[in-house]
């Protein structure tokens, strides 16, 4: 696996079902100095299939197989390394905002040697019909084929419930902050920022002269 730093990278995880608002909140937080947003979904969609790892993804997806967690994590680490090399992300002074990774307990375990997770934000949206409505709206607005039909949408939500919620057990305790994802986006953002400002890791890093 690609080595990107001598020390573990400080990171916050945005977790929630499809349509919970992870991408929206991550993109906003990523525009604030000392934060860097990484969307795994965006990275997958921008993947160059001519590269070695791109061809590896194609081999799995074209045969209907799930991409192994090890391959996903290796791709993620290579993307982070590229952003560090291009100075888009400075791990000594920036906190990484993760959206879409880790997706399960196995990925979290693979990343433990590289990431120091200082907070997990769980954007809770118990109203599944609202999630379906949001994803339909996004599919029409952005031309997202991955949200094109209700069957696909509901399957994605079921996959989340079966797999991704393992992270709540893996990161159990004070790391987890529950945020109501059904609120207006500006209220969700306000709640996230208030939690970040109280986080000891953020307080330590904010004192650094940059």
Image: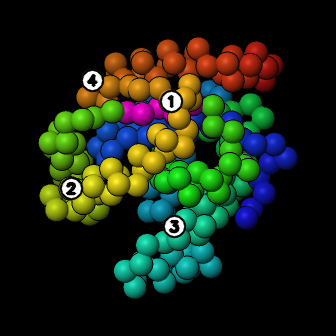
Depth check: 141 or 181 in front? 181
Q: Give the crowd class for mark 4: few <14, some 14-19, many >=20 residues within 10 Å.
A: few
Mark nearer the viewer, 3 or 1: 1
Q: Secondary structure at mark 2?
A: helix
Q: Which mark is residue 176?
A: 1
Q: Give the crowd class for mark 3: few <14, some 14-19, many >=20 residues within 10 Å.
A: some
Q: Is residue 207 above or below residue 151?
A: above
- Alpha-carbon distance for marks 2 and 3? 25 Å
Q: Which residue is mark 3?
A: 47
Mark 2 / mark 4, whichever is N-terminal:
2
- Alpha-carbon distance for marks 1 and 4? 19 Å
Q: Residue at x 74, y 19 (%)?
A: 204
Q: Residue at x 58, y 15 (%)?
A: 197
Q: Which mark is residue 154?
A: 2
Q: Give the crowd class for mark 1: few <14, some 14-19, many >=20 residues within 10 Å.
A: some
Q: What predominant SS class does the magenta segment belong to?
A: strand
Mark nearer the viewer, 2 or 4: 2
Mark nearer the viewer, 2 or 1: 1
Q: Is residue 47 above or below residue 50?
A: above
Q: Secondary structure at mark 4?
A: loop
- Alpha-carbon distance for marks 3 and 1? 31 Å
Q: Residue at x 18, y 47 (%)?
A: 132
Mark 4 near mark 3, Cβ–Cβ under 8 Å?
no
Q: Which residue is mark 4?
A: 183
Q: 33 left or right of 8?
A: left
Mark 4 / mark 3, whichever is N-terminal:
3
Residue 151 included in the magenta stretch of the image: no
Mark 2 / mark 1, whichever is N-terminal:
2
Mark nearer the viewer, 2 or 3: 2
- Alpha-carbon distance for marks 2 and 4? 21 Å
- Alpha-carbon distance for marks 2 and 1? 26 Å
């Amino acid at each position: 696996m690609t080595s990107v730093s001598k020390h573990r990278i400080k990171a916050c995880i945005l977790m929630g079902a499809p349509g919970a608002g992870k991408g929206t909140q991550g993109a906003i937080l990523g525009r604030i100095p000392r934060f860097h947003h990484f969307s795994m979904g965006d990275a997958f969609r921008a993947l160059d299939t001519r590269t070695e790892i791109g061809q590896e993804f194609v081999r799995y997806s074209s045969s209907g197989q799930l991409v192994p967690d090890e391959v996903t994590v290796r791709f993620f680490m290579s993307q982070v390394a590229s952003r560090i090399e291009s100075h888009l992300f400075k791990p000594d002074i920036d906190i990484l905002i993760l959206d879409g990774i880790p997706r399960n307990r196995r990925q979290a375990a693979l990343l433990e040697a590289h990431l120091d997770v200082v907070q997990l934000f769980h954007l809770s949206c118990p109203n599944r019909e609202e999630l379906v409505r949001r994803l339909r709206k996004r599919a029409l607005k952005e031309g997202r084929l991955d949200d094109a039909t209700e069957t696909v949408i509901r399957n994605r939500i079921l996959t989340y419930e079966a797999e991704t919620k393992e992270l709540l057990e893996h990161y159990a305790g004070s790391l987890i902050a529950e945020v109501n994802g059904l609120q207006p986006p500006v209220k969700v953002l306000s709640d996230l920022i208030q939690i970040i400002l109280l986080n000891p890791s953020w307080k330590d890093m904010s004192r650094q002269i940059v």
